Image: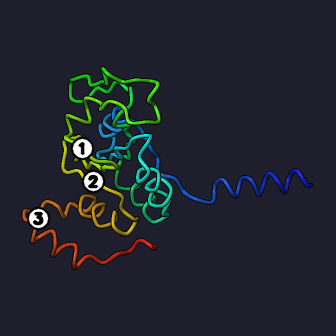
Amino acid sequence: MKNLLFTLFALVSLGATAQIKWMTLEEAIAAQQQEPKKIMMDVYTNWCGPCKLLDKMTFTNEDLVAYVNEKFYAVKFNAEGEHVLNYKGKQYFNPNYDPTKEFKRNYSHEFTDYMGIRGYPSIVFMDENANFIMPVTGFLSARQLEVYLKLFGENAYKEISTKEQFQAYEQDFQHQFKS
């Protein structure tokens, strides 16, 4: 009986919070062929404190998790990692990767440079054909990220072409994610 209670407690504890279904960019692009969705890519580094906070504080918000899993393919990409990545017929890698610097500042991955990412964390949004829409750089709370998730998830970005229009969108935005 004691073992059964422990097992039930452990299962409830582990399953109590929903998680984002992370995948590689190649997996997301393949999934787009079966079910078109946009891509939300978390571009991080192993040494980045705000990146760790994003994982711990933002990507655990139940409302955000549910929305991301419904509307996006979520991708994790280590901006300084050694992963060889295939994107639109070209192979990208990190020719200067130093394994002794795995948890320190390392060399930038070619794909990071291709995307023009210079700060971490960055969240890159892509359309249903894996074309870049826009990156958002810096730590964001779940409610701050909600603005961008819905901007792209609901295609509102297609109606916005100026900074002033975005500011109006942001000002009128009705948050639904709980803090």
Q: Earlier in the sequence, mark 2 or mark 3?
A: 2
Nearest to the eye among marks 1 and 2: give it: 1
Q: CA distance from mark 3 to mark 1?
A: 27 Å
Q: Residues within 10 Å of mark 1 (few under 14, many from 20)?
A: few
In 3D space, how far apart are the residues under numbered discs 1 and 2 (Cα atoms)?
Answer: 9 Å
Residue 34: x and y in percent read: 33, 39
Q: Classify 10 Å Cα crowding around label 2: few (below 14), some (14-19), many (20 and above).
A: some
Q: Secondary structure at mark 1?
A: loop
Q: Residue at x 34, y 75 (%)?
A: 175
Task: Specify the amino acid type for callout 3.
Answer: Glu
Amino acid of disc 2:
Thr
Residue under pointer 3:
159
Q: Secondary structure at mark 3?
A: helix
Between discs 1 and 2, the one toward the N terminus? 1
Would residue 2 be found to the left or right of residue 163 on screen? Answer: right
Q: Amino acid at mark 1?
A: Arg
The residue that disc 1 covers is 118
Circles 1 and 2: CB atoms closer than 8 Å: yes
Quadrant of the rendering where the N terminus is positioned: bottom right
User: How far from the left and from the top, in percent, is residue 50?
Assistant: 41, 54
The answer to whether residue 127 is above or below residue 95 is: below
Q: Which residue is at the front of the view, 144 or 45?
A: 45
Q: Position of residue 21 (x, y in %)?
A: 46, 47
In the picture as drawn, the residue positioned furthest to the left comes out as: 162
How many numbered marks does the figure carry?
Answer: 3
Q: Residue at x 44, y 60 (%)?
A: 58
Give the mark toward the camera: 2 or 3.
Answer: 2
172 horizontally vs 122: left or right = left
Structural distance between the alpha carbons of marks 2 and 3: 22 Å
What residue is pinned by disc 2? 137
Secondary structure found at label 2: strand
